[in-house]
Image: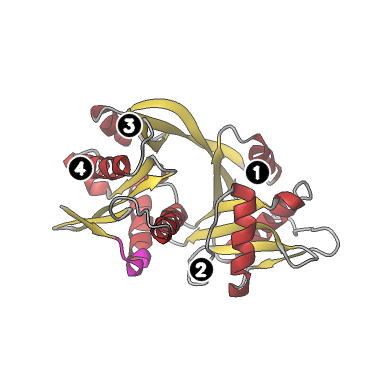
């Protein structure tokens, strides 16, 4: 088995493969195909910023792993500085190949951080990955995210926004406004790409700014939608705008044939929990943070 740097043209095939893996082994080992795409785009943007400032992190952050049978997995190194992800094909889960990918991602992450611990997360129902991590010296240290799910067969209300605001699908012309709204909401930039499989719904303020956004991802194989990210510009909070963007997106997901929709949030983020409960989501899983000394 060998790893190679990710190429942009890999993404459709990787997402299709991961959808098939989820269908075969369940979501617990993989989350959603939208998380894969979002994390790849996110880490590549950070990588590009480092290069602009002449301080590139060590190595390529995304590696595609292949063996004689084809695609074996994908690793993403350096998320949040000291975290990594490993998505392993069902046929290699729990074995030496998965261990090799975890160690490679951990090593690559360690080269780019001075934090005392290396981190990764695991679904509460993914015992196979927990056992592998524990064999490699990782230990559980916190609940990381709550995973929320909502059936789309239930009614989805018409989005309502205050006078002068508009809720709609994003266009390529919204790239700068989305980047600004994301930076204001999360303290970091983001680049909307018109060719991305993630489709943002946005709420536009009377002055033309993007006030809130919800990026929707769809997995037609498993008929599952997903949100990542969802945010509101601080200047427009507490007006129900993120709720409106999510309702707009959920109606589109249902029209596209999705049967469920999920969204994850930090377990300590109470405002996010209240928003998602108000939209009919319920917590179905937790993810656990695992760490090992650097």
Who comes first in sequence, dot 3 or dot 4? 4
What's the CA distance linking mark 3 and mark 4?
A: 15 Å
Element type at mark 1: helix
Q: Which residue is mark 4?
A: 100
Q: Which residues are magenta?
A: 6-12
Q: Which residue is mark 1?
A: 276
Who comes first in sequence, dot 4 or dot 2? 4
96 sits to left or right of 247: left
Q: Please rate how many residues cluster around mark 1, counting C-alpha atoms within 10 Å: few if below 14, some from 14 to 19, many from 20.
A: many
Residue 143 visible: yes
Who comes first in sequence, dot 4 or dot 1? 4
Q: Quadrant of the C terminus?
A: top left
Who comes first in sequence, dot 3 or dot 2? 3
Who comes first in sequence, dot 1 or dot 2? 2
What's the CA distance linking mark 3 and mark 2?
A: 35 Å
Element type at mark 4: helix
CB within 8 Å, label 4 to label 1: no
Q: Position of residue 284 (x, y in %)?
A: 53, 37
């Amino acid at each position: 088995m060998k790893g190679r740097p990710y190429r942009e043209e890999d993404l459709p095939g990787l997402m299709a493969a991961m959808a098939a893996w989820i269908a075969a082994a369940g979501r617990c080992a993989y989350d959603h195909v939208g998380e894969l795409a979002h994390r790849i785009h996110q880490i590549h943007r950070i990588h590009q910023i480092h290069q602009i400032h002449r301080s590139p992190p060590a190595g390529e952050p995304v590696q595609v792993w292949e063996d004689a049978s084809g695609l074996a997995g994908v690793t993403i190194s350096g998320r949040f500085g000291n975290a990594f992800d490993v998505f392993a094909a069902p046929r290699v889960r729990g074995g030496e190949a998965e261990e090799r990918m975890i160690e490679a991602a951990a090593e690559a992450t360690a080269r780019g951080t001075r934090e005392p611990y290396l981190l990764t997360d695991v679904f509460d129902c993914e015992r196979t990955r927990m056992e592998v991590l524990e064999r490699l010296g990782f230990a559980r240290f916190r609940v990381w995210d709550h995973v929320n799910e909502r059936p789309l067969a239930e009614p989805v209300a018409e989005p309502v926004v205050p006078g002068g605001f508009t809720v709609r699908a994003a266009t390529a012309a919204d790239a700068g406004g989305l980047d600004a709204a994301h930076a204001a909401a999360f303290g970091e930039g983001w680049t909307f790409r018109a060719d991305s499989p993630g489709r943002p719904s946005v709420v536009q303020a009377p002055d033309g700014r993007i006030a809130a956004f919800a990026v929707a991802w769809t997995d037609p194989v498993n008929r599952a939608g997903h949100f990542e990210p969802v945010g509101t510009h601080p200047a427009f909070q507490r007006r129900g705008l993120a709720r409106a963007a999510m309702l707009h997106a959920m109606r589109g997901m249902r029209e596209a044939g999705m049967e469920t929709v999920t969204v994850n949030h930090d377990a300590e983020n109470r405002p996010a929990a209240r928003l998602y409960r108000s939209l009919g989501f319920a917590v179905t899983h937790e993810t656990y943070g695992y760490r090992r000394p650097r």
